[in-house]
Amino acid sequence: MRADMPGRMSLDDFRHEALAEVGSTNTECLERARKGALSGLWITAGRQTGGRGRRGRAWFSEPGNLYASLLLIDPAPMERLGSLPLAVAVAVQEAVSRIMPLDSPDVLIKWPNDILVDRRKICGILIEGETLADGRHAVVIGCGINVAVAPEAGLYPVATLRGFGASASPDELFAWLFRSMAETLALWNRGRGISAVMERWKSVAGGIGENITVNLPDRSISGRFAGIDDTGLLKLETDDGGTRLIAAGDVFFG
């Protein structure tokens, strides 16, 4: 390995700063990166005043939930970064599963990285990146988990972990996430371990083999969810017998 290529991170490489309130934990991480912050910094907040989701959507960010972002610097070569969302989803699914009652519904991943309980969304994940002035690439993993409160309406049915009997606080959930993310990123190993990550992802994925609709920016297409390819793209079997690979979109079951 070249001296300038970072190796596998361990639990000791991560650190945590808790804030009472922030505009956006993702934005805070990116600002820290521009000021020279090292890889492995977690920022959590009790409340966000400017939280955001995918495609610029506002993200409900009232107190009672977990709002957490992790800063990674040069986490993998650019050609292997596409598999990072799968690893992140595996880590979040593991953390949430740890605090759920034994009789609760399964915690599943909806492609690529929404977390569902009883087919209702309890977590959104937003991954953003930026090339810094010194040439390093900053990647921020943002997680918003509905512990106690949820938005009234959205694109997808939503729920809270409290609604399924989970009693853990946001801080307790974060303690599990801190460990599971470190372990999963070590397994991912800068993209080299994607095969092992994908096996774990498939074992907790929701809707494989079912009919789904994928909303793309310009249209919607339907078909059978045939799983993912070896790079993490969604495989959609269409009515004409063909298979379409999809890199990004909002998935709806049924």
Image (spheres, helix red, strand yellow):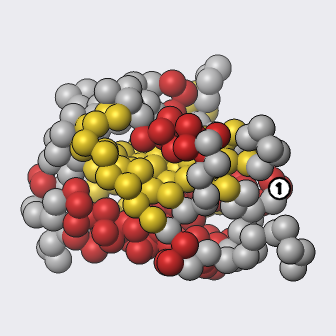
Residue 25 in sight in this render: yes
At a point 80% along the width and 44% down the height, the residue shown is 134
Q: Residue at x 74, y 40 (%)?
A: 132
| In the foreground, 177 or 131 | 131
Query: Is 132 above or below relative to 160?
Result: above
Is 62 above or below relative to 92? above
Residue 218 lies left or right of residue 48; in this view the side is: right
Q: Quadrant of residue 133?
A: top right
Residue 55 location in percent, x, y?
Answer: 54, 27
Residue 90 picture location, percent across and down = 48, 66
> Foreground: 26 or 206?
26
Residue type at mark 1 is: Glu
- Identify the secondary structure beneath mark 1: helix
- Looking at the image, which residue is at 49% across and 78% down? 11
Q: Is residue 28 above or below residue 71?
A: above
Q: How many marks?
A: 1
Tell me what residue is drawn at x 64 percent, y 48 percent: 36
Snapshot quadrant of residue 135:
top right
Residue beneath disc 1: 79
Q: Nearer the viewer, residue 192 or 50?
A: 50
For this view, does 61 lie left or right of residue 167? right
Q: Residue furthest right?
A: 2
Q: Position of residue 183 (x, y in %)?
A: 51, 77
Which of the pair 243/35 is nearer the observer? 35
Residue 182 to residue 225: above or below: below
Residue 148 place in picture, x, y as percent: 15, 47
